[in-house]
Image (spheres, grey):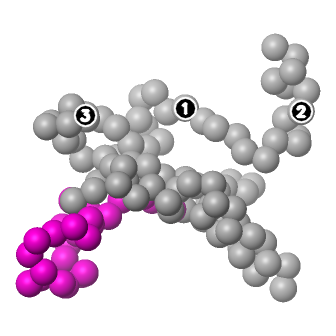
Amino acid sequence: NSNNNSNNNNNLVTFFGDPSGEFTRACGMELPDIPHLGLYGRSKRFVMYVRDGIVKYVAVSEGKTDDHDDDSNNDNSNSNSNNDDPTGELDPTATCAPAVLEALAKLRAEESK
């Protein structure tokens, strides 16, 4: 379709597919298999800003939920802290447009100094 190619230089965002998962694995963004949810070979919920082949910004939505009855372990450095919400479904904000646009605005401001 000529419309898809005519404005490539004006695109704000370009989406790429990764059907084999090769890029996902190379970036360390492979979601561990979650059999009880039927998730196998999936990627984490992430956004990556790359300019001229250089990764400038990465955000991943995954994390520990705060709705636990047991408050006895408040150590946020727990290595399993991402296991409660590995898909980022409960709080995807880090990879949603408002957070990403804010981060990119800060990045551009720093680069223009």
Question: Marks 3/1: CA distance?
Answer: 17 Å
Vertically, is 96 above or below 74?
above
Q: Quadrant of residue 65?
A: bottom left
Q: Whole-percent x and y of residue 96?
A: 56, 54
Residue type indicated by callout 3: Tyr
Mark 3–mark 2 Cα distance, whole angstroms, equals: 36 Å
Query: What amino acid is found at the position of numbered circle 2 in the picture?
Result: Asn
Q: Which residue is mark 1?
A: 17
Residue on which the image places disc 2: 7
Relative placement, left or right, of 16 versus 2 is left
Task: Look at the image and say whether residue 109 sits in the magenta stretch.
Answer: no
Q: Indicate the quadrant containing the C terminus: top left, top right, bottom left or bottom right.
A: bottom right
User: How many residues crowd mark 1 within 10 Å: few (<14), some (14–19), many (20+)?
Assistant: few
Residue 42: x and y, percent?
A: 34, 38
The label shown at residue 40 is 3
Is residue 101 placed above or below 46 in the rendered structure? below
- Which secondary structure, mark 3? loop
Residue 102 visible in the shown view: yes
